Amino acid sequence: MTRPLDRLIRPKSIAVYGGKEARRVIEQCDRVGFAGEIWPVHPKLDEIFGRKCYRSTADLPAPPDASFVGVNRALTIDIIRELSAIGAGGAICYASGFREAMSELSDGGDLQEALVTAAGDMPIIGPNCYGLINMLDGALLWPDQHGMVRATNGVAILTQSSNIACNISMQTRGLPLAYLMTAGNQAQTGLSGLACAVLEDPRVTAVGLHIEGFDDIRTLERLALRARELKKPVIALKVGKSEAAQKATVSHTASLAGNDAVSSAVLERLGIGRVHSLPAMLETLKLLHLYGPLADTDISSMSCSGGEASLMSDAAVGRNIHYRDLKPQQLGPLRESLGEMVTLANPLDYHTFVWGNLERQTTAFTAMMSGGFSMNLVVLDFPRGDRCDSSDWMTTVDAVVAAASATGARAGVVASLGENMPEDIALGLMEEDVVPFSGIDEALTAVEIAAAIGAAWAKPTPAPLIDATVTEGETTLLFEDSAKAELAAFGVPVPKGKVVATPDEAATAADEIGFPVVLKGLGIAHKTEAGAVRLNLSDAESVREAAALMVSVAKGFLVEKMAPKPVAEIIIGAMRDPVAGPVLTIGAGGILVELLEDSAILTLPTTQDTIREMIGRLKVSKLLDGYRGGPAGDKDALVRTVAAVAHYVAANASKVEEVDINPVLVLPAGAGVVAVDALIRKRS
């Protein structure tokens, strides 16, 4: 168990080890006005930038709160051991050549383990990382240039990549950056742990994570819970694929789930918004910094161009964005201020009739912002400052600010082209509590994510993910007969059936069950491809003949009652994710699994309300609701069946590797569902 990170990330004293990189750390701290002590440690130099150099860790005047260790990898381990022994607050390990370099350096993994052992309970960040920038206190354990300025409050951004951090530091979007941190190899302290620490700083308003691979799911859950408690939203840019992701070999489930889909499901469960680009991350953090989560995605849009109004309208297609109609009380003031030639709608093209007129623009914007929208956006691309006069544009800015102030509404100014939002204007808007958005898509993404976080926080806090330690032992495959028996014991409906050994026994069983029946060959993973499935057999002789044709590939037979024609076919699956543990997949089933790619992931444990919500997101849900006059499916029975599978997986969490129930036939409302095929892969 490591000590808290407070001293490391908010130090009052900093020790620096090394040559060029150490000098840069001192230089950066001096440049931004770090008020604490800086102690260079060097075996030969007498001073660096006018500061006395200490020959060794033992010579330091006191245990430093934070240390930047910029020496070679072997010496790094020795220094970390020394710092831990004197009770230092923590250290940045700059050197590379550890676990990230195992393909080139065979001892990289061993050295990383030695580094963690040397640290003991002293927090370390890295190795193979630049370190951290704290612009609230002017503490920079950072060996390079950056583009940040001192801040009194702002967002924290954490990444594994030092180069990504450098790029973020150079942003000119008006986003106040309080902390910028890199985690490198996450040998001891991961992104989630760092995020938990910065979240506690009252000056931090929101957190952004750039994640290449989840470090520790329990710490991530703790981060999400604390974010909810403190009302400080967290978003994540999750990239990459987990090397540990297991590939299912006998079912469709893995092709539907995939590591990336599971990542999205985990983040959604935790109430962590997911973005897919750095620009989207920065723009979303602006909104969250000023306003926090949103109640919904009802927004208004205003522009002085029909083209811009169309761009805003089209950008909402396929998104959870709603341009709600204007309220009757808004129409009078809008008509009075804009004139008869303007069509009053949302998005609103207010034309150029009021361009440059502060009073009339303010009246129009005030009327628009009085509609109770979660966000009110005004499209405004600014002219080049080196060639043009932006006076009229600033009139519009003043009108937006005045209207937002008068109504108490949330407002944003959106430049359709990111480069048309100058940094000085963006900073000025942020000072007036108006979000300066660079890009239409990014603005709408920010609204979606802020509303998704709001919706997640409005729900009960989710239970912790299932913590299932994998049972040792070989995996075995349960074919359809055995798999159905296990699932039926947990409440999954299966057809009436019987397992037999010979074609004659199959014919007898069919007579007992009642026609029509289905005949299946046992011991075959993909029966349809092997010709080991015959449907709708209506007499004993047909069953006997069909079974005789399967004898060469089948290890016995399953005779089952033929199910009625369904409203829809669904797949219910489960697989073990290396991070999230067992997860469920639901989607369009039958032969359409890969063709439609219509699926949703359920992390466990889950609830029937969540199951119903996820089913509602599927394209196939339109069939379940009664498509074009067709019968509605028994959605309640489907929800119960998914819940039964979830119960089975949870009860066998340490053993189950994979479940594939495909198809589950959803019958008309009131008639239930029936699982007509199933496979289970589990450890013995």
Image: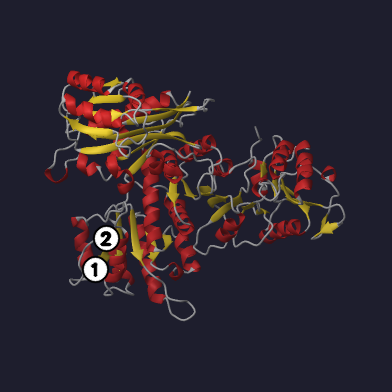
Q: Which mark is residue 337?
A: 1
For label 2, the crowd category at 10 Å Cα-Cα, with few meaning under 14, some 14 to 19 and many 20 or more, is: many
Three-letter amino acid code at the position of disc 2: Ala
Residue 21 place in picture, x, y as percent: 73, 57
Q: Residue at 20% of width from left, 30% of height from top? A: 563
| Residue 620 appears in the rendering | yes
Residue 447 higher or lower than 363, as above or below:
above
Residue 536 place in picture, x, y as percent: 18, 32
Q: Nearer the viewer, residue 68 or 349?
A: 68
Q: Nearer the viewer, residue 214 or 18?
A: 214
Question: Dividing the picture into quarters, in which one does residue 624 lie?
Answer: top left
Secondary structure state at the residue bearing disc 1:
helix
Of mark 2 and mark 1, the one earlier in the sequence is: 1
Q: Which mark is residue 469?
A: none
Three-letter amino acid code at the position of disc 1: Ser
Residue 42 place in picture, x, y as percent: 83, 53
For label 1, the crowd category at 10 Å Cα-Cα, with few meaning under 14, some 14 to 19 and many 20 or more, is: some
Residue 177 higher or lower than 533, as above or below:
below
Q: Which residue, given by chain and number where applicable, does mark 2 sit on? A: 367
**Colour scheme employed for the rendering of this structure:** secondary structure
* Real-space Cα separation, disc 2 to disc 1, in angstroms: 9 Å
Residue 413 place in picture, x, y as percent: 39, 63
Q: Residue at 37% of width from left, 31% of height from top? A: 606
Q: Residue at 35% of width from left, 32% of height from top? A: 553
Question: Dividing the picture into quarters, in which one does residue 525 lie?
Answer: top left
Secondary structure state at the residue bearing disc 2:
helix
Residue 290 higher or lower than 389, as above or below:
above
Q: Indicate the quadrant containing the N terminus: top left, top right, bottom left or bottom right.
A: top right
The answer to whether marks 2 and 1 mark residues whose Cβ atoms lie closer than 8 Å is yes
